[in-house]
Amino acid sequence: MLDKITFAKRYSKALYEVLEEKNQVEAGLSELLSIKQIFDDNSSLSRVLTDVSFPEDKKESLIKPLIDNSDVEFVKNLLKVLLGSNKMDEFTLIVEEFERSYNEKNKIVHADALSVVPLSDEQKQKLADVFKARVGANEVILDNKVDQSLIGGVILKSSNVIFDGSVKTKINNIKKLLLS
């Protein structure tokens, strides 16, 4: 039996390849993210749709609006396959893997900017532009998080890159120099 991550990777890869052949990757991603939001907003939905004791006709009536409102045939098929195999609880993982693949192929990087105060849109854009150039990305999606312990400055974190320009770190580095 496949673990959830392997299952999600296989399904997302297959869906990505099919949508890529049909030039529907962006449309598919948009629909997948919209449907994922419904699952995120209704945390018990995937559990109910996977519950073997819940009547099949009720499961179908719950998922039917999602299938009917989808314009991408392969997204509809994915929902039907997952419902039919009692794997709807894997849907959000599949979408996350699909989005990760999309971001990787399009050089889109998600990053957190930690700062003492919320950053303005202009500051976020400047940081995103600098980070984009540093990591060789086409686009940086920046999420600003406030951390009062920093004293000042900004820390940029991505999946495998950290740029620490915080005052706290600079003070700690000076302390280390003075103590050595």
Image: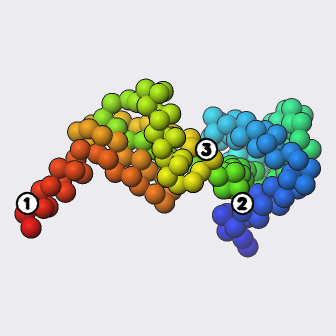
The Cα atoms of the two marked residues, 1 and 2, are separated by 51 Å
From the top left corner, tell me how far across and down residue 126 is, in percent: 47, 35
From the top left corner, tell me how far across and down residue 130 is, in percent: 48, 44
Is residue 163 shown above or below 148? below
Q: Which mark is residue 8?
A: 2
The Cα atoms of the two marked residues, 2 and 3, are separated by 25 Å
Give the mark, 1 or 3, whose residue is nearer the N terminus.
Answer: 3
From the image, tell me which residue sits under label 3: 139
Q: Quadrant of the N terminus?
A: bottom right
Compared across the picture, whether 61 is left or right of 106 comes to right
Mark 3, secondary structure of its residue: strand
Q: Quadrant of residue 12?
A: bottom right
Q: Quadrant of the C terminus?
A: bottom left
Residue 77 visible, this orientation: no
Q: Which mark is residue 178?
A: 1
Residue 126 visible, this orientation: yes
Q: Residue at 44% x, 50% y: name it.
A: 157
From the top left corner, tell me how far across and down residue 66 is, in percent: 82, 36
Mark 2, secondary structure of its residue: helix
- Amino acid at pointer 2: Ala
Contact between marks 1 and 3 (CB within 8 A): the answer is: no
The Cα atoms of the two marked residues, 1 and 3, are separated by 40 Å
Q: Quadrant of residue 177?
A: bottom left
- Amino acid at pointer 3: Glu
Compared across the picture, whether 9 is left or right of 135 comes to right
